[in-house]
Amino acid sequence: MLETPHTGLGADSFLEYAFLRWVLTPATLPQIVARVEPQAAATIGERHYRLDYEIVGDEQRVAVELDGFQFHSSRGAFTYDRLRQNDLQASGRSIVRFSYDAIRTDVGRCVAQLQAVLALDPSLAALLVSSPVLETPEMDPDPIHALAPPPGAAAGGDQDDYFASVAEQLNQATLRDCQSEAFAALANYYGGGGNRAACVMAVGAGKTALGVAATLAFTRRRAMVVTPGSVIRGTFDRAFDPEALGNVLNGLPGGPLIPGQAPPRVLTLDRNFGPIGEVTREELLASDVIVTNFHSLGDGESPGDLLAKIDSGDVDFIVVDEAHIAAADSYQRTFAHFADARTLLMSACFQRLDGKPIDADVVYRYRLIDSIVDGNAKNLRVHRFAPDVAQTTYEMVWPDGSREEIVGRDALLELLGDERKLARVTAKSTEPMRQVMRVVRDALEGQAALLAPVKPRVLFSALGELHAAQIAEVANEFGIPAAHLHHSMGEAQIRETKARFESDAGNLQALVQLKMLGQGYDFPAICVVVPMRPYGSFSECYQFIGRGIRVIQDVRLAGQVAPAEQILDVVYHAEFGIDDHIDTIYAENDMDPLIEQIEADDESHGEGEVAGDGGAYGQPQAEAFVLFEHGTVEERIVHGPERIEQARIDRERQALAQRYADYVRSTESPVSFEQYASIIGALGS
């Protein structure tokens, strides 16, 4: 390839080299080099950006932004990018953008557009070439090569040999659309100098596969995957294991993620596997990817801590799953220790545990309704039991026989941080619990009729160990085989109880858990979730509900129950304050809460009878169950059929708009968008 002073400006990627080589070189005289600043820093308010290139004239500052991937959707996926551009424009800069495909397929237009922007400044206009000589760019059609090192980069160097080779072989075709869109957003973000990215993706969207793909593509030397506990740590451990069932490297439905490539060297560290202090620095540096949880990192003060054994430059890419807890001190210590590393924070929840937004640039957002439309998530059907009594009374029974009453939700919330007290709490009357259990039983019966032969399961949450045992006892009385899990149980008993719950041949249909099967526990057969405790934060509540959101992909349901027909029943007691959290789910999806308030009418409806038109499971209808005289149950569908259909139409329209934009750029006499849509529609039919 021809080398010029332009290509000597410096490029961190092949895309940057392509801009210098095939756009800037033919567009400008060599003297332009003195006015070009690669990887220019721009501080606007509290935001710090890095520009691919900034061209400084006497009157104009031109920011050159390079996008490795075209935007495939406009439904809020790249909000960060738009906000970034607004900031740059507000600072007085002119912005010119070129994508990998634009340079590859229409370099002449790119040169003309760059010249048109530079001509706005007299000093830059004097450096333009009057008759540009264009060359056909030597660029691979796969935009993944935008991430490759520039030609002539020293082998190894700042890029580890493994990641340098595997990044170019990444097979994006095996990813789902939402994963590919998120990957594209990350590529453009990191390519633009960003360091702290976040992807908010609904349950079922495939965050684990995205985390693996991002690790392979964006790591230069070594990556670290940090999880909040052993459940998610195990998920990533399996994802990186090429021999494990359902691994991400070779086990995705669309084929291998890195075809023909060796897997990365992965070191999984967990205190459950042995003393962390025995792991040597040499073992850490011999790995490409370190998978661990935040408990194992330590604070770096003790020589045995992982943070004491790894220098700041040893890790340059960090993936954090369940990032809503990333405000924790352990995570902040990790970010501070690896201050220059790129980070990817992933979560299904858009709020941290402390209620604040995720402390990162949200470059991609895949909402729950998007996941439902794509068949990755169940819709939510909410059953809210509203008792007639003002407040429920709970009590703590101490070993000496003394009793202490707790009245109402606020008093319960005050106990949430005191595990010693929570372990002693029980409901003084089980009648409200029984009312809720009637709804749970009816929901399970409806789910069983829909999903046969798949056995639907129910997951409860409880206040403490005694309360969990109490819930399980009531569930068994209602014919729902149940057991409870708590941290004081031995590992063997926990595994045995989970096996009885998860196996179709097992004798359990319900589990009552105490923060043991929350974030990271995915078992699609859970079709009913019952929060029997208040939650101090939305994210904690949402994580619990999310355990049942993933659709059931079972060959026995093929042709019988489509993903769009699957529903997760959420049953709760109004006094626990779950209403606000349910409303937040509505707000996250740009919806107004719709709930039909239904009064008790004991004369017209008996126990468990449906008031209204009813409707089959899988065909959402507004319904209400009226139970005795103790209270009412209101039911609502979070996303009704009309809302889902409208979301599907909107997304198809937005995808068509993107195709139309590509069409307009490729023709001199484009037809109108409506004509284009009509033509495409006719071709499709």
Image: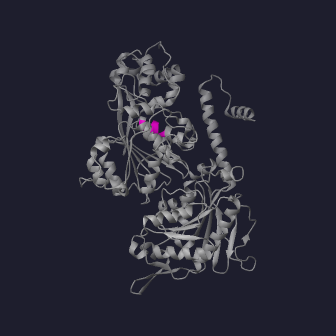
Residue plotted at (69% across, 32% down) = 676
Residue at (43% x, 75% y) in the render? 423
Magenta residue span: 185-190
Query: Exactly how many numbered labels are in the figure?
Result: 0
In front of the other: 90 or 554: 554
> Could you say where residue 517 lies in the image, as x and y percent from the top left?
49, 62
Question: For residue 450, what is the image quadrant?
Answer: bottom right
- Asked if residue 500 is positioned above or below residue 105 in the image, the reply reads below
Q: Is residue 438 above or below residue 15?
A: below
Residue 403, x across and y down, in percent? 43, 85
Secondary structure, magenta segment, majority class? helix
User: x, y (%) of residue 130?
Assistant: 46, 13
Please tell me whether residue 317 is drawn above or below residue 676 in the rendered image. below
Quadrant of the frame with the C terminus: top right
Q: Position of residue 644 (x, y in %)?
A: 66, 51
Colouring mode (rainbow / by chain / secondary structure / one colour) = one colour
Asked if residue 228 can be seen in this view, the reply is yes
> Is 579 situated left or right of 669 in this image?
left
Q: Which residue is at a point 59% across and 70% down the rendered structure image?
A: 481
Residue 656 part of the magenta-drawn span: no
Left or right of residue 672, residue 463 in this image:
left
Quadrant of the rendering where the N terminus is positioned: top left
